[in-house]
Amino acid sequence: MKFSFRPSEGAFYELFTRAAQNLVRGTELLNELALPGVDVQSVSERLTEVEHDSDQITHELYKKINSTFITPFDREDIYRLGSLLDDVMDHLEAVGNLLYLYGLTKLPSLPREMHELVNVLDQQARLTAAAMPRLKSMKDLEDYWIECNRLENEGDQAYRMLLVRLFSGEYDALTVLKMKEVADELEAACDSFEHVANTVETIAVKES
C-alpha cells in the first residue's frame, strides 16, 4: 500500500482554479471591446475589479503556503504558479486600461490582428481554467500544455502581423505608439499563459 504524507484538503487547488477562472472573465471582458457601442470605461473598470480579486486570491495563496506545514507539491512551484497566474491578469487589465485611457476605441475599428490576439488569449484562458482542477490528480494535463504552447505560437504570429500593419503607414505616428504599447501587453499575456503551462508541466514531471 502506498502511503501519502501530502495534505488531503484541496485549498491550494481551489485557489489556482479561482485565479484561472478570473482569467476567463478577463478575456471575456476584452472580447466585449469588439462589440459596437461598447462602454469602454465600464470594461476597463470591471477588468480592474477582476484584477483586484486576483490579487486577493494570490495573497490568500501565499498566506496558505506560509501556514501549511506540508504542501501538496514544492512550495517554490506553488509560489511560481500563483505569481504567474497573477501576471497574466495584470497584462489583461493593462490592455483594457490602455485602450480606454488612450482613446483607441474611438478609431473606426481596432486592427483585426488585435482581435485575433484577444481570441488566442481567450482560448488560452479557457484551457488554463479547465486544467487547474486536474492538478489535484496530476492526470490528463499533457494536452493542456501542448495546446497552450501552440496557441502562444499562434499569438506570436498575430503579434508580428499586427506590427506589420502598425508600421504600414495606415495610422499616424502617435496612434502607432499607443497601439504598439497595447500590442506588447497582449503579446506579454500570451507569453505569460505559456509560462503557466510550462510551470504546470514542470510540476507534473516532478510529481510523476
Image: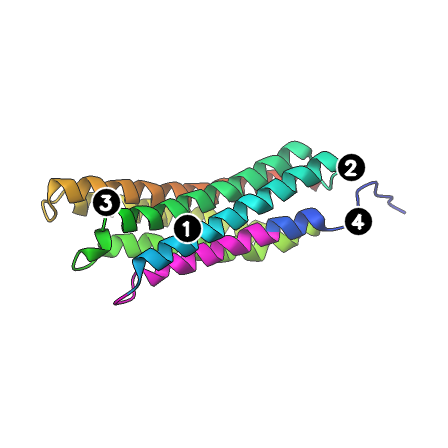
The CA span between labels 4 and 2 is 10 Å
What residue sits right under mark 2 in the picture? 70
Marks 1 and 2: which is nearer the front? 2
The CA span between labels 4 and 1 is 34 Å
Query: Where, quadrant-wise, is the C terminus in this rendering?
Result: top right
- Badge 2 amino acid: Ile
**Does 121 appear above or below 84?**
below
Q: Secondary structure at mark 2?
A: loop
What residue sits right under mark 1 in the picture? 151
Dot 3 or dot 2, earlier in sequence: 2
Q: Secondary structure at mark 1?
A: helix
Marks 4 and 3: which is nearer the front? 3
Residue 102 lies, in percent from the top left, at: 24, 46
What residue sits right under mark 3 in the picture? 179
The CA span between labels 3 and 1 is 22 Å
The CA span between labels 3 and 2 is 46 Å
The CA span between labels 1 and 2 is 35 Å
Q: Secondary structure at mark 4?
A: loop
Q: Main structural element of the magenta stretch: helix, strand or loop?
A: helix
- Badge 4 amino acid: Ser
Task: Reply yes or no: does residue 27 show up in magenta.
Answer: yes
Residue at x-position 19% and y-position 56%: 106
Crowd rating for badge 3 (residues with CA inside 10 Å; few <14, some 14–19, many 20+): many
- Badge 1 amino acid: Leu
The CA span between labels 4 and 3 is 47 Å
Q: Which residues are magenta?
A: 17-37
Residue 110 lies, in percent from the top left, at: 22, 55
Determine whether, in the image, residue 133 is placed left or right of residue 84: right
Dot 3 or dot 1, earlier in sequence: 1
Dot 4 or dot 1, earlier in sequence: 4
What residue sits right under mark 4 in the picture? 8
